[in-house]
Image (cartoon, helix red, strand yellow):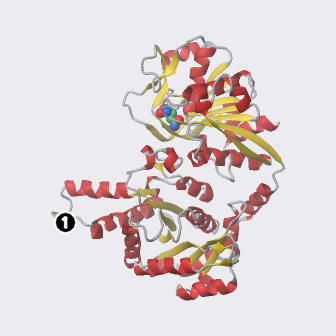
């Protein structure tokens, strides 16, 4: 049976609880254990698919097609495992499931209450994660901060989980802030004390504390924290601000957090952690000698988290090539023919990321045109590919009002249209790459598996016109040959646009081939 680690946060949000959870996941994985991760989000949306990227950052898509919180992206990148819809639980989902059961009469007329119905449904999600993943360890991060009204049912559920699964099969890790007061030149343990008391008042005695701090925490302070938390000193760990996030994996390992965890679970005879690759990576990141500047021409650029996986993928490719990637955040809404050169000329490459709706599309098309004409490496992603074809149709093929019906329903030349069942295409699908194309060369294989999230599709009526052009290549299709998946230009340094989201599968130790090749085209 799986063992469960629950990660809660105290004092403030944005502590890096997700990164702590994911780092622990990687350490345990490197000890040969199968790890699965899960996030419980206290908001009432059923999923983040419809939430504004301004509020919530990127929507991460799992291989099985769930639209999830961006934390799942961190988890996948850190533990290098594909997660699933069972990894993403929201209050909206829980209530939806309970209400559906109630409507079907499955509760036999009972009065539906938070305890036990909602809490049981939450516990069910733990069991489902265990059952479907077959993992040795399930790590569940509870979103929000202890003390929030919204997270109470989750805390109650994980409290009950110990009663149900047993003491040695459940472990509570509490992540708190230990602030440093500059004026007093002191770190303060009181907020942690309050947070631990709050957690205890809900019936949860943490087994491990991870203390987030800007400054080193003295032995004496750790001892004090351990005492008021009823913990042995060796159950108290620190997570100091790091220059490279992956350093946290190494630092928690150095403090032997895995020993504390495995001891609690009574799991011995587990192989030693092998983290050399991460050590090499962290060292490499600290010594990147060149810089490349990449423009991300998007619509939600004020909140950088809206493009989190794209930025991470660029970084991964940069690490491999020994270059630091700097981002030129370009608000596509402000881009026009007059200023495009000024805005983009300082960048070595251009990314046109995914997006939705009408706003800022003309600016993106202008940027694509600039990249195409000036031989600037460009990678178009999802909406980026759709607009790449619109730009080409208009400016090269002479179809002046070419557009996607997402922007102009009445265009007489709809290059992108909806599919018949009007459903969003989500999750991983197999794609066949045309032989002897750049993309075929980049992947060095004929069939690939990539994740999708789109509602509009290339209109095959226009295929012939594109095929007759001798520079643009329609270079990849879905397995059944129905859906156009990628285009490229023959005569260009790097001009590739794809219908899928390569950024969702790039990993720090396994950079994605498209991003690798994009960066390579810039530095060679
Ligand atoms: N808005 C486009 C569509 O729905 C592209 C989506 C995206 O870029 N993720 O097809």
Rendered position, 433 above or below 45: above
User: From the viewer's perspective, is 520 left or right of 176?
Assistant: right
User: From the viewer's perspective, is 483 left or right of 221?
Assistant: left
Residue 444 visible in the shown view:
no
Report x, y in % for residue 254: 70, 74
Quadrant occupied by the N terminus: bottom left
Say which residue label 1 marks.
111
Quadrant of the rendered structure where residue 367 is?
Answer: top right
Residue occupying image coordinates x 68% and y 61%: 246
User: From the viewer's perspective, is 57 left or right of 240?
Assistant: left
Residue occupying image coordinates x 29% and y 70%: 115
Secondary-structure class at tag 1 = loop
For label 1, count other residues whose C-alpha is less than 10 Å away and answer few (under 14), some (14-19) or many (20+): few
Residue 196 visible in the shown view:
yes
Rendered position, 366 above or below 70: above
Quadrant occupied by the C terminus: top right
Question: Looking at the image, which is closer to me, 57 or 433?
Answer: 57
User: From the viewer's perspective, is 90 left or right of 464?
Assistant: left
Question: Looking at the image, which is closer to me, 38 or 340?
Answer: 340
Question: Looking at the image, which is closer to me, 224 or 29?
Answer: 224
Report x, y in % for residue 304: 60, 47
């Amino acid at each position: 049976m799986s063992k469960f680690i629950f990660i809660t946060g105290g004092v403030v949000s944005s502590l890096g609880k997700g990164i702590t959870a994911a780092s622990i996941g990687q350490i345990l994985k490197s000890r040969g254990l199968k790890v699965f991760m899960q996030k419980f989000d206290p908001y009432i949306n059923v999923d983040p698919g419809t939430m504004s990227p301004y509020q919530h950052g990127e929507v991460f898509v799992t291989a099985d097609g769930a639209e999830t919180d961006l934390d799942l992206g961190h988890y996948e990148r850190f533990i290098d495992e594909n997660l699933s819809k069972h990894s993403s639980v929201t209050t909206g989902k829980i209530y939806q499931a309970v209400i559906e059961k109630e409507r079907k009469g499955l509760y036999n007329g009972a009065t539906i209450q938070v305890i036990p119905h909602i809490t049981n449904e939450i516990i069910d999600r733990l069991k489902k994660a265990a059952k479907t993943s077959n993992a040795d360890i399930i790590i569940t991060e509870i979103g929000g901060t202890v003390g929030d009204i919204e997270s109470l049912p989750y805390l109650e559920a994980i409290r009950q989980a110990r009663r149900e699964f047993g003491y040695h099969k459940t472990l509570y890790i509490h992540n708190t802030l230990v602030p440093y007061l500059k004026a007093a030149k002191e770190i303060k343990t009181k907020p942690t004390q309050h947070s631990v008391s709050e957690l205890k008042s809900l019936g949860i005695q943490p087994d491990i504390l991870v203390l987030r701090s800007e400054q080193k925490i003295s032995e004496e302070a750790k001892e004090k924290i351990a005492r008021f938390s009823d913990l042995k000193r060796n159950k108290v760990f620190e997570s100091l601000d790091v220059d490279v996030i992956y350093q946290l994996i190494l630092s928690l390992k150095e403090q032997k957090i895995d020993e504390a965890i495995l001891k609690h679970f009574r799991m011995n005879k587990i192989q030693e952690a092998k983290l050399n690759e991460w050590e090499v990576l962290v060292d490499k990141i600290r010594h990147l000698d060149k810089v490349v500047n990449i423009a991300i021409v998007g619509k939600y650029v004020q909140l950088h988290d809206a493009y989190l996986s794209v930025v991470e993928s660029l970084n991964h490719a940069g690490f491999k090539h020994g270059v630091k990637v700097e981002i030129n955040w370009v608000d596509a809404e402000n881009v026009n023919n007059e200023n495009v050169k000024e805005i983009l000329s300082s960048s070595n490459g251009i990314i046109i990321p995914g997006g939705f709706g009408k706003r800022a599309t003309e600016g993106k098309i202008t940027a694509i045109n600039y990249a195409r004409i000036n031989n600037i490496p460009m990678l178009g992603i999802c909406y980026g590919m759709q607009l790449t074809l619109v730009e080409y149709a208009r400016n090269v093929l002479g179809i002046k009002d070419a557009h996607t019906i997402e922007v102009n329903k009445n265009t007489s030349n709809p290059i992108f249209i909806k599919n018949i069942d009007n459903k969003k295409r989500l999750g991983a699908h197999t794609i066949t790459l045309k032989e002897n194309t750049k993309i075929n060369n980049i992947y060095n294989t004929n069939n690939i598996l990539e994740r999708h999230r789109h509602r509009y599709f290339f209109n095959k009526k226009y295929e012939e016109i594109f095929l007759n052009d001798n520079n643009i290549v329609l270079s990849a299709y879905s397995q059944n040959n129905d859906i156009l998946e990628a285009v490229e230009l023959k005569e260009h340094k790097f001009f590739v646009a794809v219908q899928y989201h390569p950024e969702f599968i790039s990993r720090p130790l396994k950079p994605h081939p498209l991003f690798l090749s994009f960066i390579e085209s810039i530095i060679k």
